[in-house]
Amino acid sequence: MKGERTIDLGGVTSSSAVDLTDQIHQLPCCIKFNGPSPVSHYFKPKSTGVEVDALNVKEAHFRGRKLQGTTVTLPHGYSGFVIGKKTPAKRKASDTNGGMTDSWQANAKFQNITLWNHDNLPSKEDAFLRAFHWFDVAKALHKPVTADDMESASNPGATSTD
């Protein structure tokens, strides 16, 4: 391994951590700018009163293009994090292990995200929302197997007499 990589989530576990719930947006475009901007002055989503696939539709405009989106709460037990690269602290040459170290830190957290589409209404068939199904798959794959699970798998027709 050429270098060490770490992600520090300690800063967002305290009550003083920045909470960006209701402020995270997934836009269907690439913005080649990294810095402060008065986004809330120009980008003003509003509810349309329309519901599609049990999703409340919002509408906004970005650079003259109409966007339609919905706000989705992250599944129970999950949180989103905004991470950034840590500024490397000055170290002595003898402190390094010869490889590069990438350290990241959590700068903020969030519990929901607003997803936007250009030309169509949001639906449960959107790729981002379909990815949420993997949470259930991961949970099933990593669930500890009990003796009862092993017994029922080896004797599929047997019934429990408890």
Image (cartoon, rainbow, N blue to C red):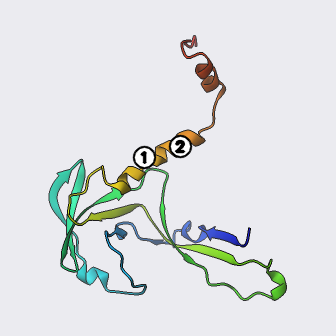
* Percent x, y of residue 124: 30, 49
Helix, strand or loop at mark 1: helix
* Percent x, y of residue 107: 52, 75
Q: Residues within 10 Å of mark 2 (few under 14, many from 20)?
A: few
Task: Name the quadrant containing residue 68.
Answer: bottom left
* Residue that badge 1 annotates: 133
* Percent x, y of residue 81: 49, 67
Q: Residue at x 31, y 54 (%)?
A: 126
Helix, strand or loop at mark 2: helix
Badge 1 or badge 2: first in the primary sequence = 1
Q: Residue at x 37, y 57 (%)?
A: 128
Vertical placement of residue 129 versus 15, above or below: above
Would residue 13 be found to the left or right of residue 23 on screen?
right
Quadrant of the rendering where the N terminus is positioned: bottom right
Numbered disc total: 2
Which residue sits furthest right? 94
Which residue sits furthest left? 49
* Residue that badge 2 annotates: 139
Quadrant of the rendering where the C terminus is positioned: top right
Vertical placement of residue 148 versus 26, above or below: above
Q: Residues within 10 Å of mark 1 (few under 14, many from 20)?
A: few
Would residue 89 be found to the left or right of residue 139 on screen?
right
